[in-house]
Amino acid sequence: MKRTALFSAHQKLGARLIDFGGWEMPVQYTSIVDEHLAVRNAAGIFDISHMGEVTVCGAAAEEFLNGVLTNDVRKLSPGLGQYTLLCNQHGGAIDDLYVYKLSAEVYLLIVNASRTQADVAWLKARAEKFPRRGEMILSDASHNYSAVAVQGPRVKDFIADCIPGASLAALRVNRVTDLKKNQIGEFHFDHGGVLVSRTGYTGEDGFEIVGGDKAIELAWYKVLAVGAPYGIKPCGLGARDTLRTEVCYPLYGHELDEQTTPIEAGLGFFVSDGKGEFVGGETLAKQKANGVRKKLVAFKMTDKSAPPRPHYPIWVNDVGAGIVTSGTQSPSLGIGIGLGYLPPESAGPGTKLEVEIRGKRFAAAIVPKPIYKK
Amino acid sequence: MSNIPSDLKYTKSHEWVRVSGDIATVGITDHAQHELTDIVFVELPDVGRRLKAGEACAVVESVKTTSDIYSPVGGDIIETNKSVVDDPALVNREPHAGGWFFKIKLSNPAELNALLSSENYEKQIGG
């Protein structure tokens, strides 16, 4: 298994480690519930070094990316990022990712660890067919980068003490906390600069820091030390999963796969209507206009039951109608919650469902997304 | 470091057994509750159910995972602990006391000889 630059830091903290997409990663340090609540109420830091980084540079980079990603890359000014998807010809999701415009002809894609190879293979194959391929360079730069996510309502109170000073490139700001949602700046830091964006995967305010192994190792210890009086905790993938499930962010391999489109997953907002042709665009436009065969819904258990889990059947009016894709006990709400696919006629908020758990059915109801709101 | 009381017997699958006459009380060990961490749900067998030694008969769920609990001995379930159904975190707080799962009337007391002593259980978990 692959290990991140923070592996020894996790061992020192007594983390429980699991295999996640071929990476040996911390699932929890103390308790998923404690780590989850630290992020909701104060602050938490996650190792996200396993995620992939792909750079696309050159005069034709924007045109290329706009032909393969669902969102409109032309809306990005230097120092801004957007959530977007990479789709196949049928509109099925190859990956969901963030694309940042660092400068006029330099783009950084942050992709899922488990999909990095598939993404790079797909992008390279598309690049070979791209008429202006000579005017761009596409590289898998994952081995050059480590990364941490610092998340929670108190993070803005101490992050500038960890990464002091004005940014030097990407978006120019006087201090890191001047970054607004989805903005990214490059800051001076020991062992070279780091990229800091105001993004995350928890539903809380927060920052993600990307840089070389040594810089990120230093950032990990600095954030934990400076954040200690604010209640920061190191957080594992267990809490990352419960946090994102509460706010209904998709996880590739659960809500998204190559047979599922962004429209079906409720991500139509990130599929551009007016930017012209892109891979999968025809199917996605048709689905936007004519509807879909399955729709991602969020639900809460209304019976006392065991927590819903991925692959459990969902019943509507005594008919097996769908499957749970993500499910857990919500640490914030204290009840079972989940996401799953249902036919569109059964996908309206308020619809009564049953989730089958070990052969017995328990009542649940579709709720509006996100499941958890401040 | 787990708490491993010496007056209990243990299984490799992390249940403990407290014997009183021909009645065995069963729960999960301190080591098991620590591994599971945030226990959010416990499902117990029905009273009257007849179990074989090693039979899956209860379920404990943490935030992250679902785990089967196996009866360490054969016999009939005579009582279950409603407190852990109502307050699953009791298993985390008091695994060897208030967090017990069920009581079973032994059908073959000789099966107790196959269980682990506290010393052997401690060795198994690398205590």
Image: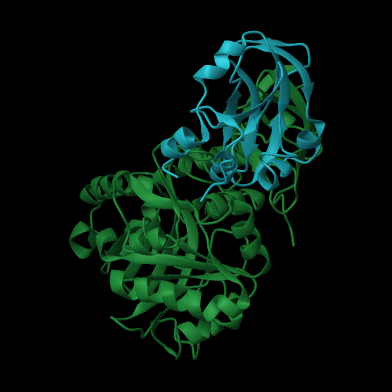
Q: How many marks?
A: 0
Q: Does residue A88 appear to the left or right of B1 in the view shown?
A: left
Q: Is A68 rendered above or below residue A138?
A: above
Horizontal and vertical percent for residue A292?
61, 33
**Which chain is tinted cyan?**
B
Residue at 56% of width from left, 41% of height from top?
B4
Q: Nearer the viewer, residue A192 or A185?
A: A192
Q: Nearer the viewer, residue A134 or A296?
A: A296
Q: Is A289 rendered above or below residue A14?
A: above
Q: Does residue A331 appear to the left or right of B14 in the view shown?
A: right
Q: Is A131 rendered above or below residue B63?
A: below
Q: Quadrant of residue B60?
A: top right
- Chain A colour is green
Horizontal and vertical percent for residue A302?
81, 36
Please, which colouring scheme is shown? by chain
Q: Nearer the viewer, residue A41 or B12?
A: B12
Answer yes or no: is residue A293 visible: no
Residue at 49% of width from left, 91% of height from top?
A174
Horizontal and vertical percent for residue A197?
47, 72
Residue at 25% of width from left, 60% of height from top?
A143
Residue at 57% of width from left, 53% of height from top?
A239
Horizontal and vertical percent for residue A81?
47, 67
